[in-house]
Image (cartoon, helix red, strand yellow):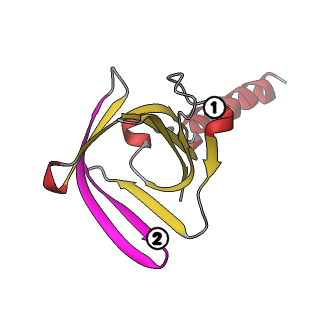
Amino acid sequence: MKRTFALSLLVLAAVGALLPSCKRKEVFETRKTRIQHDWKLVRTATDANANGVIDASEIHPVSATYIATLTFKSDLTGNENVIANGVTTDYPFTWTMDPTLDTITRSGVGHNVIKYFLADISSINMDLTTVTDLGVAGYYYERK
């Protein structure tokens, strides 16, 4: 009986020692690493009532004839690929992110600089807002 109990303890100890090695490694993601993907624009918004925020009624789906993909790479370069009415245009850029303010600064050709606020990001969705001469604009993306 003692021998069976001791053998059982030995087997349990061996199995217990193996369990941590089978554990799935979790990757710690930050907002900066999560953004580094290809994103398809699915909805846009403008602050039509000029109240300084995007209301749900101001968000609209993107036209089927307009396809925009935004790519952020880990080397801090990116590209916006736009297909509008069958014509394809690429807008390469470099980018930086201030994680304390959740702002992304996108610098493109011809000193074209856009500053986005990263309103929300998950593994499948990203919401950006920016302030233009016409007010607040929102861009809603799904991960490709």
Residue position marked by numbered label 1 in the rendering: 16
In the image, residue 116 above or below residue 60: above
Mark 1 vs mark 2, CA separation in Å: 59 Å
Q: Do we see residue 25 in this rendering?
A: no
Q: Residue 73, relative to residue 105: is it above or below? A: below
| Left/right of residue 98 with respect to residue 118 in the rendered view | left
Q: Which residues are magenta?
A: 76-98
Badge 1 crowding class, 10 Å Cα cut-off, few under 14, some 14 to 19, many 20 or more, is few
Q: Is residue 70 visible?
A: yes
Q: Residue at x 38, y 41 (%)?
A: 33
Which is closer to the viewer, label 1 or label 2? 2
Residue 23 lies in the magenta-colored region: no
Residue drawn at point x = 47 percent, y = 79 percent:
86
Give residue 116's position: percent from left, percent from top.
36, 36
**Disc 2 element:** strand
At label 1, the amino acid type is Gly
State the residue position of label 2: 84
Name the dominant secondary structure of the magenta segment. Answer: strand
Label 2 environment density (alpha carbons within 10 Å; few <14, some 14–19, many ≥20):
some
Q: Residue at x 75, y 30 (%)?
A: 8
Residue 128: where, in percent of width, then height?
46, 38
Q: Position of residue 45 (x, y in %)?
A: 55, 42
Q: Is 61 in front, or is 6?
A: 61
Tell me which amino acid carries mark 2. Answer: Ala
Viewer-nearest residue: 72 or 55: 55
Left or right for 29, reference 51: left
Could you tell which of marks 1 and 2 lies nearer the N-terminus?
1
Quarter assignment of residue 22: top right
On the image, which quarter does residue 38 sit in?
bottom left
- Asked if 87 appears above or below 116 in the picture, the reply is below
